[in-house]
Amino acid sequence: MATTTFDAVVATPRTGKFNKNHARRVRVAGKIPAVVYGAGQDAVAVTVDPRMITKILHSESGHNTIFDLNVEGSGVVKAMIVDWQHEPIKGHLLHIDLKRIAMDKTMRVSVPIQLVGVPVGVKNGGGMLEHVLREVEIECLPNDIPSHLDVDVTGLEINGVIRVSDLPHSGSIKFLGEEDATVAHVTTIKEEAAAEAVAGAAEPEVAKKGKTEAPAAAATDAKKK
């Protein structure tokens, strides 16, 4: 796991009605609304400094970073960012969900897969490397969460495939999902062009909603998990 150290994130409990006006006032004051939950305790509505959250999200371990969360009046706990929402135009943080983490209990997270090197099938065979699976779900203790998984693809020939089973395995990490799922492969240029032609003939894909979408009304503020 990445060893980047952050100052404790201070969370101030919120009171009153959690509606659009309340959230707007929080943001005008330079904070963002958030919810803290997990570890068998009640969810708590709080405000936090968006600069601290942005720094964590942009770190090497990103949203998988475990940090100290100082909830005023309740003490310091270990926490992780599990969901966040951006304003779609300027990208400002609008709301985040924080989960209390028990360091002695395993948890499920998704970690990115990074391809290392240039495949021989690309370098000498004129093929094309396709990165199919960009992150994989694992289960492990919080201290064993890697910031990413490196995969050496230099030995891939034309039609060569890297699967989940080829990723670096260890006793501290359990891979979830299919072990034979394709992570990356090398195809010929003709095969790639044919695949793109088939995809272009299909119906347009509906835009997927993600963490950069605007939130749904003020229900987010009152959401509890």
Image (spheres, grey):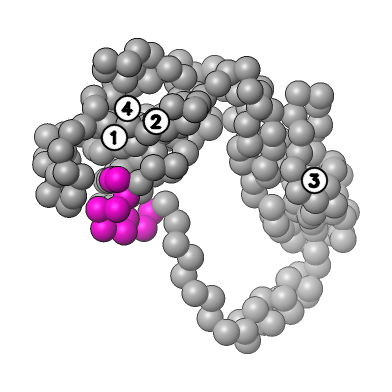
Q: What's the distance in space between the residues labelled 4 and 1, CA to CA? A: 17 Å
**Marks 2 and 1, how far apart at CA:** 10 Å
Q: Is residue 79 above or below residue 135?
A: above
Horizontal side of 108 relative to 10 (left or right) equals right
Q: Please tell me which residue lies in front, 101 or 32.
A: 101
Res 216 → quadrant: bottom left
Q: Secondary structure at mark 4?
A: helix
Which comes sooner in the sequence, label 3 or label 1? Answer: 1
Residue 171: % across, % down: 81, 24
Horizontal side of residue 146 vs 185, given as left or right: left
The range drawn in magenta is: 212-222
What amino acid is labelled 2 in the image? Answer: Asp
Q: Nearer the viewer, mark 4 or mark 1?
A: 1
**Crowd tier of the residue under label 2, counting other residues whose Cα lies within 10 Å: few below 14, some 14–19, many 20 or above:** few
In the picture of the structure, the residue carrying the numbered disc 1 is 45
Query: What residue type is disc 3 on?
Result: Val
Q: Nearer the viewer, mark 3 or mark 1?
A: 1
Q: CA distance from mark 4 to mark 2?
A: 24 Å
Tell me the residue that label 2 is attached to: 42
